[in-house]
Amino acid sequence: MILVWLYLYYRLIAFTARPQSRSKEEEEEEKEEQEKEKEEEEEEEEEEEEEEEEEEEEEEEEQQQQQQQEEEEQEEEEEEEEEEEEEEEEEEEEEEEEEEEEEEEEEKQQQQQEKVKTRF
């Protein structure tokens, strides 16, 4: 009978000890799961930060490209304006030269006419 009681007592201890060890195991598993979740969250945050940085870099590159394009366009416009001004100046000079030539021709004609008049 004592053996039966000892056996039952042993079974009772073993039974009560199991759930405690299970709860420790479960706690350890929960801790591991929490750690895994934390790691995953950290990784996701890092990925998001990297993506944001990449997007910012892309935006900066686009802005730089736009600025370069605008600067190039401005330079081209300025060059075109300068060319137009030069052309206008050249045209004006040509017109002045033509006028001077015409005046010289008129003067020559007048002089010739005067010479012809004075001869007669």
Image (spheres, rainbow, N blue to C red):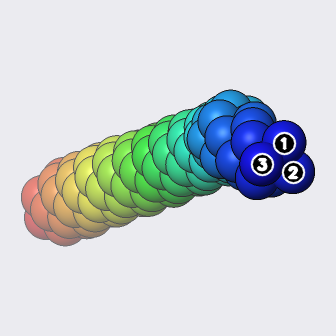
The quadrant the C terminus occupies is: bottom left
Residue ID at (67%, 40%): 12
Q: Residues within 10 Å of mark 1 (few under 14, many from 20)?
A: few
Camera sees residue 100: no
Contact? badges 3 and 2 (CB < 8 Å): yes
CA distance for labels 1 and 2:
4 Å
Residue 20 image offset from top left, x and y in percent: 68, 33
CA distance for labels 3 and 2:
5 Å
Residue ID at (77%, 48%): 1
Given residues 55 and 66, the one toward you in this image is: 55
Label 3 is placed on what type of residue?
Answer: Met
**Residue 70 vertical position relative to residue 76 in the rendered view, above or below:** above
Q: Residues within 10 Å of mark 3 (few under 14, many from 20)?
A: few
Given residues 35 and 61, the one toward you in this image is: 35
**Residue receiving disc 2:** 3
**Residue 52 vertical position relative to residue 95 in the rendered view, above or below:** above
Q: 109 left or right of 69?
A: left
Camera sees residue 36: yes
**Label 3 residue SS:** loop
Mark sitting on residue 1: 3
Residue ID at (87%, 51%): 3
Label 2 is placed on what type of residue?
Answer: Leu
Label 1 is placed on what type of residue?
Answer: Ile
**Label 1 residue SS:** helix
Contact? badges 1 and 3 (CB < 8 Å): yes
**Residue 15 vertical position relative to residue 110 in the rendered view, above or below:** above
**Residue receiving disc 1:** 2
